[in-house]
Amino acid sequence: MDFSHDFAGDTEFLKLLGRQEHQVDLTTAALELARDAYPDLSFDPTFSWIEGRAGELRGPMTRAGSDEAILGELSECLALHHGIVGSREIYEHADGSFLNRVIEQKTGIPISLSVLYMAVARASGIELLGVGAPGHFLTRYETFDTPLFVDAFAGGSILTYAECARRLETTQSVPPDAVRQAIEPVGPRLIIIRMLNNLKTLYAKQGEWQACWKVQHRLLALQPSQYGQRRDWAVITLKAGRSGPALEMLEACLATCPSEDKEFLEQQKRVAHGKLAQWN
């Protein structure tokens, strides 16, 4: 499948499709996802807000006497002065994943808050890196000694390497010998995939199949060779009322599916045939 036409207006997403990850502006890529939900979305207000916060931070960051103090200025600006913190309730709303709405509502889920922290940090002259830690996305700041971590969801709290490792071991049951890998930085591609997976899970739970289809179409474009993405695309496409394309993909999946999926896919195929018959 050629996806370039489907995302012709998404310059950063197209870079991800073209394996040009090192050239991707993550903030813009995240806003491209938000535009699926808000088709008339202008990116300018978000970038203006980010630049405004950077303007507030450059002086205090320059005067900060330590790496911890630099990160403290960032957290104080965003969480204390502008009230942007995580909330458990936002997990049930897609807006928690969209940068424009995170700014407007002053809350979001860990990954979207982290992307916002990364954007403000970069505009302020420092580099935060994304960390796809199990269960809870974080950001990472490299120092001359050992990295520090920022939990944007928890008001920008700062964690040492030891504190971050202990959290993963105790709350996510990550084995000690796997912690180092779990908190390595991840790039825009994996961040966007994780954001999409969050939205996919939420939309499916809520039965928002048209919105879920847009998300799954992006996931398939990013991972077209993965059987699981093709299978999910077929099922979600059927639920979104696109029986013809769903049937084609279901037949393709049946040719290579594991045995445990065959009965389910056959059942979905019968549903697709039934829906097509209603229109013929």
Image (cartoon, rainbow, N blue to C red):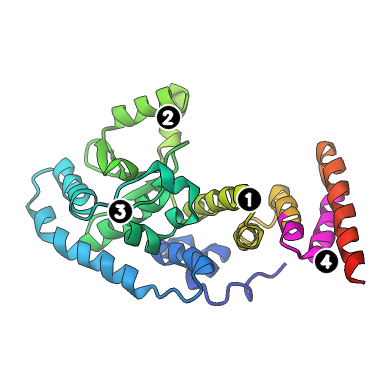
Q: Quick one: label 2 or label 4, which is nearer the N terminus? A: 2
Q: Amino acid at mark 1?
A: Ala
Q: Which mark is nearer the camera, 3 or 4?
A: 4
The spot of residue 277 in percent (x, y) is: 92, 65
Label 4 secondary element: helix
Which quadrant of the figure contains the N terminus? bottom right
The tag on residue 179 is 2
How busy is the neighbourhood of tag 4: few (under 14 within 10 Å), some, or many (20 plus)?
Answer: some
Q: Is residue 171 above or below residue 221?
A: above
The spot of residue 230 in percent (x, y) is: 73, 54
Are the residues at dot 3 and dot 1 in contact (C-beta closer than 8 Å)?
Answer: no
How busy is the neighbourhood of tag 1: few (under 14 within 10 Å), some, or many (20 plus)?
Answer: some
Q: Which residue is mark 4?
A: 244
In front here: 236 or 195?
Answer: 236
The spot of residue 199 in percent (x, y) is: 54, 53
* Residue range (magenta): 236-255
The tag on residue 117 is 3
Q: Quick one: label 1 or label 2, which is nearer the N terminus? A: 2
In front here: 249 or 148?
Answer: 249
